[in-house]
Image (cartoon, coloured by chain):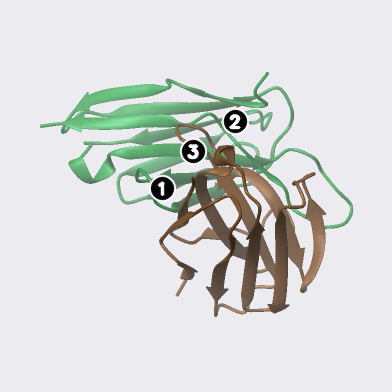
Chain colours: A green, B brown
Amino acid sequence: SQELEQSPQSLIVQEGKNLTINCTSSKTLYGLYWYKQKYGEGLIFLMMLQKGGEEKSHEKITAKLDEKKQQSSLHITASQPSHAGIYLCGADMYKRLLGNEKLTFGTGTRLTIIP
Amino acid sequence: DTEVTQTPKHLVMGMTNKKSLKCEQHMGHRAMYWYKQKAKKPPELMFVYSYEKLSINESVPSRFSPECPNSSLLNLHLHALQPEDSALYLCASSRGSTSTDTQYFGPGTRLTVL
């Protein structure tokens, strides 16, 4: 089974509407990242959350990490065509004494914005 | 500047060819990564270099050979690949290799093996 589950798998939203994407883990997350990917291109870093209860915003995108650090949500307000793409959460799921970060990615959410 | 560059953008090769993918960053990052991404799947980690030394190899077949000539460059040498190796290959770099060091990704190389 996938260690990081995202929901929904795909989302079609009318321009101007709000939307939320969720990322859920069965384990405590150490460093939760949100990335956006256009088809066939690289990943664009959006935000990183580390502390339980933490919330960060950038332009119209807000990300939260719950208190238990096992779930994160990404909320987009007043969606625009430029928000279309694949959203991926990524997390280091194994706390190590010595570095060597190993990101595990979620299953991805494909967002389509219709005019 | 958080730019990671990758060349070539597209690569088509036969199963007997030898080719290399190149990744470069000038952010002073000391950790660099190779990921493989199949269509409609998330990226999967292949290799991690930390301070120019290979620190993680995710049981990748030997037909993929990574190389880190210096702290700014990361290569992936390809030899005797199979059609199922066709994928988007992504390079990333981060300042360090802890869980709070953000990884910045390049645009990827689209590899097709015939």
Q: Amino acid at mark 2?
A: Asp
The numbered disc on residue A88 is 3
Q: Are marks 2 and 1 in contact (CB under 8 Å)?
A: no
Q: Is residue A13 left or right of residue A62?
A: left
**Mark carried by residue A106:** none
Q: How many marks?
A: 3
Sequence-first disc among 3 and 1: 1
Residue lying farthest to the front in this orientation: B16
Q: Badge 3 sits on which subunit? A: A
- Residue pointed to by mark 2: A66
Mark 1 closeness class: few <14, some 14–19, many ≥20 residues within 10 Å: some
Q: Residue furthest right?
A: A97
User: Regarding mark 3 in the picture, which secondary structure is present there?
Assistant: strand
Q: Secondary structure at mark 2?
A: loop
State the residue position of label 1: A57
Q: Chain of mark 2?
A: A
Find residue A5 and report its horizontal and vertical position in percent: 57, 24
Where residue B102 appears, as percent x and y from the top left, is 60, 58
Amino acid type at mark 3: Leu
Residue B97 in view here? no
In the figure, is residue A85 to the left or right of A53?
left
